[in-house]
Image (tube, rainbow, N blue to C red):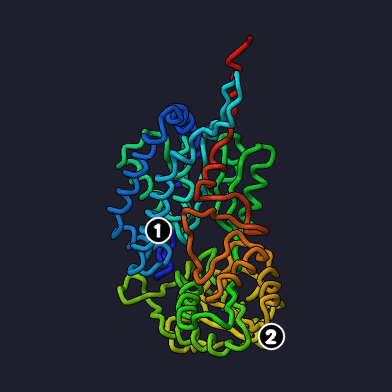
Amino acid sequence: MKKIQCVSPIDGSVYAERDITTSAQVATVFAKASAAQHLWAQRGVAERSKYCTLAVDAMISMTDRIAEELAWQMGRPISQGAGEVKGLEERARHMISIAESSLEPFEPDFKEGFKRKINREPLGVVMTIAPWNFPFMTALNSIVPALLAGNAVVLKHAANTLLVAERIQDAFDQAGLPDGLFQHVVLDHAMTSELIASGNVDMVCFTGSVGGGKAMEQAASGQFMSLGLELGGKDSAYVRADCNMPYTIENLADGAFFNSGQSCCSIERIYVHESIHDELVAGLAAAGQTYRLGNPLDSDTNLGPMIKPSAADFVRQQIADAVSGGAKTHVDTGLFSLDKLGSAYMAPQVLTDVTHEMSIMTEESFGPVVGVIKVSSDEEAISLMNDSEFGLTASIWTEDVDASERIAPQLEVGTVFMNRCDYLDPALAWTGVKNTGRGCSLSTMGFDALTRPKSYHFKTSTN
């Protein structure tokens, strides 16, 4: 029987191995999901919310286990593992809290002799295809709202984080969620495409690469299904001359280097006013050199390995290509003994004298590196920030709210931050433009993609 392996970035060992779900098993999973969903849709939102709340409670009770498993599976320092659970809790509890008001029927203005309303009906069976970098939070972005809206959910998680699907399954099982409403499968890419093309899936919520998103669209061709696609990012920051410099350095360093830079909304490009360029670069480099790169199971480690050696080597090559083109590095990687070619362990890096002719400023790095370019005006910064195939988030660092209000509408992204970055506020829509994808999750708008409108037009008087 074919198997999927989770290879740990800590030491290259096989940490977990699972049989691929067979075609017959997949058919059973979706038959159960469809049958369970029809009954689930008849239950009220308040009842659905109770099950989701209990599942969140169960995941919180697994925090220590989750932190250790994440360290082994994807290299997140164990000292930071609880943050993943706090993040999923914040998002899930918010969506639970707004579910009833968000899903209630819409009634147009009164019209004599008629009763009219629009209900939000569930789609049916939603398939979540989740990534490894923030494996619980990204999965719960769609799982919880989909269930609240009356759908059944089937989860296919990334091979790198196989055990995450099992923990989520454990949580819903402990919550007593009716059988069939949440299930997970272990599939390879080919089987995933075949499943999407089978007609058994009513919606796909996918988080991953641009290439993966294209594969989703190709597989769904002719199925007339909904697709939610959160794809790549090359997120930018603009640091104005009036910023709070210590605060800006601290937060941009965290935005660029946390999780080894493996976040769709991490800071990968910085544009800074020329008058403060050198101060910002020096501060970022100093911050980068304070990281403790090491085994993520050690409590004093705050920077673990990247997901695999080839991912780290890709970023190293981007840096090398930039340097050969005239860029300058500012972090002494010699201070990090584990950082070497062929290793998943990679030190932070800050680059200057970079241009948009370099891959490091245009292609998603997904690693602990950031390029910095000096600018002379807001207009120059806006032009460079928009010079990207991606459009997830952008951040503005300034004490001038009016300036941010003026700049933000001109930025071609789904979210504009001021004095913040690399964060999802569940009360706001999480979305993107360009090759970052399409669709929306979180906030009250997140329920729109997980439901379809059904109109009721009753003529109450025939006189």
Q: Amino acid at mark 1?
A: Gly
Q: Nearer the viewer, residue 346 or 237?
A: 237
Which residue is nearer to you in this view: 186 or 293? 293
**Mark 2, residue position:** 325
* Residue 457 found in image quarter: top right
Q: Is residue 22 left or right of residue 298?
A: right
The image quarter containing residue 436 is bottom right
Question: Counting residues from the N terminus, which is met first, the one under dot 2 or under dot 1?
Answer: 1
Q: Residues within 10 Å of mark 2 (few under 14, many from 20)?
A: some
* Secondary structure found at label 2: loop
Q: Say what secondary structure mark 1 lies in.
A: helix
Which mark lies nearer to you, 2 or 1? 1
Which disc number belongs to residue 87? 1
Q: Position of residue 197 (x, y in %)?
A: 62, 39
Residue 78 picture quarter: bottom left
Mark 2–mark 1 contact, CB under 8 Å?
A: no
Q: Is residue 96 above or below residue 433?
A: above
Mark 2–mark 1 Cα distance, whole angstroms, equals 40 Å
Q: Is residue 375 above or below residue 214?
A: below
Q: Amino acid at mark 2?
A: Gly
Q: Is residue 332 above or below residue 38?
A: below
Residue 429 x/y as whole percent: 54, 53
Q: How many marks?
A: 2
State the image coordinates of residue 359 (x, y, percent, origin top left).
66, 75
Place of residue 419 in the rendered image (x, y in percent of width and height, measured from the top left) = 50, 72
Residue beneath the point at 60% across and 36% down: 198
Q: Pick the residue in front: 19 or 375.
A: 375
